[in-house]
Image (cartoon, helix red, strand yellow):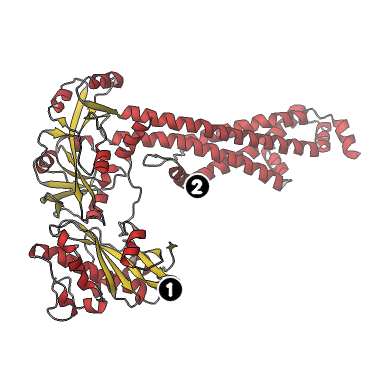
Amino acid sequence: MTKPLFVLSLLLAAAPSFAAVGCDLNDPDRDVARLFPGSTGYKTAYLSVKTLGGGKMLARIEARLGDKFKGLYETIDVPYTLYTVTKGTVTAGYIHGVNQKSEYGGTQVFLALGTDARIKAFYIQKLTSKAAKELRSAAFSAPFTGLSLKEFEAYDPAAAKLPETGPLSVLKSPSPRARKDFLSVLRAVKKNLILLDEFVFSPAPGAGTSAGGAAK
Amino acid sequence: MTIYSIAYKNLLRKKTRTALTAAGIALSAWVLATLLGFNRGYENGLNRDIDNMGFQVLLTAKGCPYEAATLMLKGGTGLRYMEEKMIRTVSSDPEVEAVTPMLMQGVFDPNKGESGAISAYLGVDALTFPRMKSYLEFKQGGWFRDNTAYEAVLGYEAAELEQREIGDKLLIPGLEAELLVVGILKRSGTQDDGTIFLPITAVQKIFSKTGKLTGLGIKVKKGTDMAAFENKLYDLPDVQVVSMAQVKTTIMSLVSSAKVIVFAIAFIAVIIAMAGVINTILMSVMERYGEIGILKSMGAMPLDVFRLIWTETAVLCSLGGLAGIGLSLLTARAAEAAVRHFLPFTPNGDLIAVDARIAALAFGFIFAGGLLSGLYPAWRAARVRPLEAIRGEGD
């Protein structure tokens, strides 16, 4: 009796969701504890540029990014998941991820930021690349620690050019074949930092950031 | 002044009682219309989902019929295969209209999440598969050029996850095979939304599975005796037959068992509503004994009194029934969400389809039940003796 049901569920079952695709941690309990050692809990909030600030916010984000949101999937209504991490009763920081189009597929780049808006941890959750192993290595992610949006303002994603001097000069493509995906990752990091700034650290007046959400 | 307006005014004399009785009738009508709508919607949805598969029978290698499950459980290894010559064997049957071969393959991608995950690819025939899945529409591009092309068509959600558009490249991790995305499908609400389709010969080459298949979709000619046809397929060596008709029958029989219980509950709800109608109208008759007596002493015949009371019942049931049908239309989506939450499998599309026919059926049932309930109070009213009633009123 259960066999045909099983087959049908495999053949027919489809996710009913019809919203734009977001970027969530695959296993939030495990990932939050790993990205924020010593944290005691987290709260999840779902935000989107469309609901928080609309076209004006999008234009501001694009201007700060130095590049337009493009393609079928980088749109104003993408839902972003913000994890507000707590240590006891105090906010320890935030985790936020973005999807980024790369050479061979979608890349999901997560940042863990302290309350000082500096990167505490950098994590590529998903990456399809010939150089995936190198780009997901600890050696590649380590130099991101301590950087903030201020440093990333020097990076121009449209020109795909890193400054030769200054704090960002420590970021290097792990190999020539990783170059395209490396630049995609940098764009994702800058976009992520800008979104966090708009959502959390310096929201524009009237952009009602939804700090509420499900606590864990 | 018509008999209807008199009946309506009589009902308004006890507004709260009338409203509560009408609410009871409305709830019964709501339950009935929603259940009838669910009955229709579920069956339609299941039929549509199965029709959308494009084939009525799926042939897979014996011992491992559920290749998708194997992919998940065994990490893309351990699949069982059929030989490609099976296409010719099955196609030669005069009852077969078309067949479409499929080869599902998966690779473990260590760069998906912390512990890696399986990426699955479905190799399909560039000629027959699109014909069978004619309902699939493209958001961008179209199907592959031929079966050997290193090209890919992505379901909408697969494309969204991989952020792919036509002209982009797709990499099969571990095998370093590069494909060109030539098509992005629109959302179909089926499993195709999350599928990455590749040309079957290209999949056979990339995964070194030349001449192998994991499935064969079979579309039979109209009027074919499915049971006899399936029995013929069972005679083929080393294959497993998965019949969509069997699957549908199994699901419908499971749902039917549940429906019997739910319809019994609906029936009880209708009985309770009818008891409420009898009580309300009977009380109304008792309270107006003297008034009815005066009516009869003025020349009203028993049939006139019967009609008056019965019309009150009809008006009450009509108002309640219409409110219930309206409620069922308003709450159809909410009820659908609840049903989807509780049922283990629900087809795509509108699950609760309350249309004009179902609304009329539910209304007719409630109205007929109401009229039946009004018979006794109307009969009691018709039998009132004028003198006794007037004397009783005076006392």
Q: Is residue B332 left or right of residue A158?
A: right
Estimate the spatial distance between the alpha carbons at disc 1 and disc 2, rounded to whole Å: 45 Å
Label 1 lies in what chain?
Answer: A
* Residue that protrudes farthest toward the front in the picture: A38
Q: Nearer the viewer, residue A57 or B324?
A: A57
Q: Residue at x 33, y 68 (%)?
A: A36
Q: Nearer the viewer, residue B376 or A125?
A: A125
Q: Amino acid at mark 2?
A: Leu
Q: Amino acid at mark 1?
A: Val
Badge 1 marks a residue whose secondary structure is strand
**Classed neighbour count for the residue bearing mark 1: other residues with Cα under 10 Å, few (<14), some (14–19), many (≥20):** few
Q: Nearer the viewer, residue B139 or B346?
A: B346
Residue that mark 1 sits on:
A90
Q: Quadrant of the N terminus of chain B?
A: top right
The reply to whether residue B307 is in sight is yes
Q: Nearer the viewer, residue A123 or B312?
A: A123
Residue that mark 2 sits on:
B330
The reply to whether residue A67 is in sight is no
Instruction: Return the x and y of residue B370 as percentages of the image width and height.
Output: 64, 33
Instruction: Return the x and y of residue B217 as percentages of the image width and height.
Output: 22, 31
Instruction: Return the x and y of residue B352 as percentages of the image width and height.
Output: 45, 40
**Classed neighbour count for the residue bearing mark 2: other residues with Cα under 10 Å, few (<14), some (14–19), many (≥20):** few
Frontmost of labels 1 and 2 is 1
Q: Is residue A117 above or below residue B6?
A: below
Q: Residue at x 87, y 35 (%)?
A: B390
